[in-house]
Image (cartoon, rainbow, N blue to C red):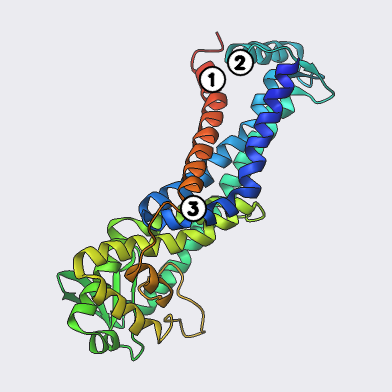
Amino acid sequence: MTAVYVLITLVFAGLLLPAVAGPRVLRSAAPVLMRMPRVAVGLLSSAVVFWTLAALSVGPLLAWVVTGPDLLPADAAAVCSRCLAAADPFGLDRIDTAVPVALLLVVPVAVSVAHAVRVALEARRRRSTTLRTAALYRHRGVPARLHGHAVRLIDDAHPFALALPRRHGGIMVSTAAVELLSDEELGAVLAHEDAHLRQRHHAVSTLVSTLTTGLRWVPLFAAVEDALGHYLEIAADDAARRTAGTTALAGALLTLGRYGRHRDHSGEELAGALHALGPDRIRHLVQPASGSRGVAAAVATAFCLTSLAMLAAAVHVPYVMAVITGCY
């Protein structure tokens, strides 16, 4: 019986600790993660996926260690009990409760379906807003090739460069930016935007934003969504720096940063676009962090994510195998 209580305590602590303390740990790990932005993007994305899967495993896990009133007919209850026994990898004593075991299985499924619908609706909304952004430039721009990159050149007095998903237009750059930036700076900006496309940053951003829809009340999710865009930009900066050099990229970011983000006619930010600007990243470009600061927090983050993944696998995989084998 003690083992059951220990298991339940560990599971809930393993979920609550990263959910609440995760933002602080991620901030502490930033000095290291900024030197490895693509690793950071992977960790942040995994945090959302693994925590969600682990949270959905709580009900099925409790179904192995508690008993309660039967809601199902006798024959169905017998089949359900056989499947639970076949899937249970622990074989621990059970605690008698007033909670029907069937609810511990039905509720996570219902929550999963409801969230999947919400995610699908959010993905559809994001696609619609991205299409509207692309439509703003479709008839204003002309195809061009600059520094080896296929771009759409927009006749606009505001200097900007941005990237939409490739199927929605790819790299957009204004005539004002071409005139204002030096040849080296323009090459750096285009390399930055091309990195967004090659590394599929739009897909990563969409995945995380849709999965966290309606769940920003979880501190970890809010912190991940807020930090993700910053690491995506740093990852693109690193790719551009290797191609065009730090000086050219820093100069371009400073120049474009003076004019701010390009917005639509109503003054709203352009949905679905990743922008090459941001003087706040200059310090990292010219003087990246060094030393061991943040290493412990980064290791703790990786350990926590591994634990969440193992918890999710330890619960979900046995259930899947039980279904595949017919609960025998």
Tell me residue 279's x, y (percent): 40, 77
Could one spot residue 62 in this view of the protein?
Answer: no
Disc 1: which residue: 318
Tell me residue 149's x, y (percent): 19, 69
Relative to 48, say whether 314 is above or below: above
| Residue 59 marker | none
Disc 3: which residue: 29
Disc 2: which residue: 88
Query: Is label 3 or label 1 in front?
Result: 3
Name the side, left or right, on which 50 lies relative to 137: right
Give the Cα distance between marks 2 and 1. Answer: 7 Å
Residue placed most toward the observer, 239 or 175: 239
The amino acid at mark 3 is Ala
Give the Cα distance between marks 3 and 1. Answer: 34 Å
Could one spot residue 16 in this view of the protein?
Answer: yes
Query: Is label 2 or label 3 in front?
Result: 3
Q: Secondary structure at mark 3?
A: helix
Give the Cα distance between marks 2 and 3. Answer: 37 Å
Which class describes the residues within 10 Å of circle 2: few (<14), some (14-19), or many (20+)? many
User: Of marks 2 and 3, which one's residue comes earlier in the chain?
Assistant: 3
Residue at x 33%, y 69% (from the top left corner): 285
User: Of marks 2 and 1, which one's residue comes earlier in the chain?
Assistant: 2
Residue at x 30%, y 79% (from the top left corner): 252
The amino acid at mark 1 is Pro
Residue at x 47%, y 58% (from the top left corner): 228
Q: Which quarter of the rendered picture does the C terminus lie within?
A: top right
